[in-house]
Every structure is written in structure tokens, then in C-alpha cells.
Amino acid sequence: MTINAEQHNHGSEVEDKKTDSVADDLFSDSGVVVPKSAANDGFVVPGSNAFGNSFRDYHAETERKKIVEELYRLSHINQTYDFVKKMREAYKKMDRVEMSIWECCELLNDVVDDSDPDLDEPQMEHLLQTAEAIRRDYPDEDWLHLTGLIHDLGKVLLLPSFGGLPQWAVVGDTFPLGCAFDESIVHHEFFKDSPDYNNPAYNTKHGVYTEGCGLESVLMSWGHDDYMYLVAKENKTTLPPAALFIIRYHSFYALHKAGAYKHLMNEEDVENLKWLQIFNKYDLYSKSKVRIDVEKVKPYYQSLIEKYFPSKLKW
């Protein structure tokens, strides 16, 4: 599926209220119109998270601080180049469970993300909050609505039927393996105990990679992002490449917030990053205690699932 300028239509009455000229959009080399910033849409960024603190404040003295720190300590020690290769090989077989996207969504009612300093609600709430916020501001981009709904589905890896992996192998910010750990990565100090940290093959700027090789060639820390990307790809989703990019790299904050690792990107990555940066605002700032009426919105999202995915997926 290709997204073109006609598909990304800002001509609706809702969109006319957001912007007065095409100057408010970015035009990519491929002709895709990408909104320039969140300032032009209806989404209001809240001043604080569900606990009254700044978003992604990993130093705030909260009841979750120690939980989050311990998760990142274990992640940075155990997420090695060899570990990730082993996990990708095991999970690419898709031989654990067979179920629909919506059935998988419902499983997230039993999942809480220990890496998240902003929310301690079941993950199903976060998925719907993200998707509905995007839907309000980008009513014509149904692929983006569905991406909002499914981007965190890989967190089912925490459940026994999907392997029952520890939190450090499922959630948290992702980062490349096989090259130096950038200092912008959350709790970078814990990398000093990683076996890869002092490995001369992995601790230089490029490591095992080459300039502009493309993120598709880069081994990322294992977790829900890469798993859901594999699930979508192996089950032959018809979602556009930008959606798969968002799913795979939405936790790669060192890239899309700090600007690190851009030397590994190719031209396609640069284009898709624009969509990821739009998506990130909704992923991060839509977290709240506001509840979504699941039964009311369910028919809409089921129609999108039918459009872009088979009825049953292998997981």
C-alpha cells in the first residue's frame, strides 16, 4: 500500500480548522504530505502525567521510580547482540498462539508496563487512548488509527502463552546492539555492566554496521516493538511501510527524540521518521486516567483490522 497526497487529504471541514495554508505541511520527496507539527491539530498536550509529574521524568521521586530503574538495569545488562539474535530466531517461527488482533488486544487488560513512569493502567486503556486521539486529529488516516491500537500488542510477551518473558525483555526504550550505546539512552549508566560494552566489535560509532545502511539492517534490543513488527510482517499485513516503522521503532527514543543514530538511517527511514514523530506525541501524551468506552469504539477498529489483517494471526 502506498500513501499518496490524495490519500492524505486535509480538505475536510475538521482539517480546515487546523491549518490555513500548505505551509503548515512538510512535503516529502515521494510526494507524501506530512503534517509539520502537532501545533496545528486539536490535541492538547497535558502539563503532567497521571501521577502529576512531567512525562518521562525518570528521576522524579514516585512509587514507580525503583521499579523502573531496576527494569532498565536488567535490560542494559542482559540485552546483548547475541541475546537478541537468539530471541528473533525463536519468535520469528510464529508457532505459539493463533488468534485475532482484537483477541490479543483484550489480553492486554492483564498487562501493566513496569518501564512506564507515566501510567500504571492496563495497556488496553493506553492503546485505545492513543488510537482515539489520533482518530480525532487525523480522521482520514485509518491506517494510523489502527497503528495506534496495535503498536503495543507485543507486550503479550509477558503472558505465559507467549513465553512469559521478564519485563526487561519486553518493555522499555529500545536501542541498537552491535554499536556503541549512545549517552541519550535512558539510564545509560547501567550499560557498563553489559558484556557488549567493552567488546571492540560493538563499542564504536558504527560497530558492525556501515554509514546509511538503513535501520532494517540494525539489530534492536528485543521487546514488544520488534515482536509486533515481526507478527505484522509474517502475517502479511497490508499496512503501509510507515506503520511498520512506527510499530518497530516507537520506543527508540534515542533516535526520534534525541536524534542519535541517524548516521545509520537511509532515505526511506528519513521519510518514515516524520510519521513516527507525529505518532509519538499521541503515544506519550494521551496517557491518562480517562476511560474509553470499549464497546462503542470496537466496531470501528474491528473494521480496520479486517481491512489490514487476516482474521486469525500466528503469534
Image (spheres, rainbow, N blue to C red):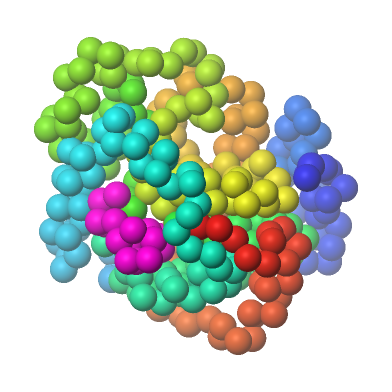
- Is 33 in the magenta? no
Q: Position of residue 230 (x, y in %)?
A: 53, 46
Q: Position of residue 294 (x, y in %)?
A: 56, 83
Q: Is residue 296 visible?
A: yes
Q: Where 137 sits versus 192, above or below?
A: below
Q: Where 303 sits versus 116, above or below?
A: below
Q: Is residue 138 left or right of residue 150?
A: right
Q: Is residue 210 left or right of residue 72?
A: right
Residue at the spot 44% in from the left edge and 34% down from the top edge? 255
Q: Position of residue 181 (x, y in %)?
A: 28, 27
Quadrant occupied by the N terminus: top right
Residue at the spot 28% in from the left edge and 14% down from the top edge? 201
Compare residues 196 and 187 and report the one nearer the observer.
Answer: 196
Residue at the spot 60% in from the left edge and 46% down from the top edge? 233
Q: Main secondary structure of the magenta part?
A: helix
Q: Is residue 148 left or right of residue 250?
A: right
Q: Where 102 sits versus 28, above or below?
A: below
Residue at the spot 86% in from the left edge and 57% down from the top edge? 11
Count of residue discs: 0
Compare residues 73 and 138 and report the one nearer the observer.
Answer: 73
Q: Position of residue 269 (x, y in %)?
A: 59, 30
Residue 195's quadrant in the figure? top left
Q: Residue furthest front?
A: 95
Compare residues 9 and 307 and report the one nearer the observer.
Answer: 307
Tell me where the magenta segment starts and ends, as one range. 155-169
Q: Is residue 190 left or right of residue 292?
A: left
Q: Is residue 288 visible?
A: no
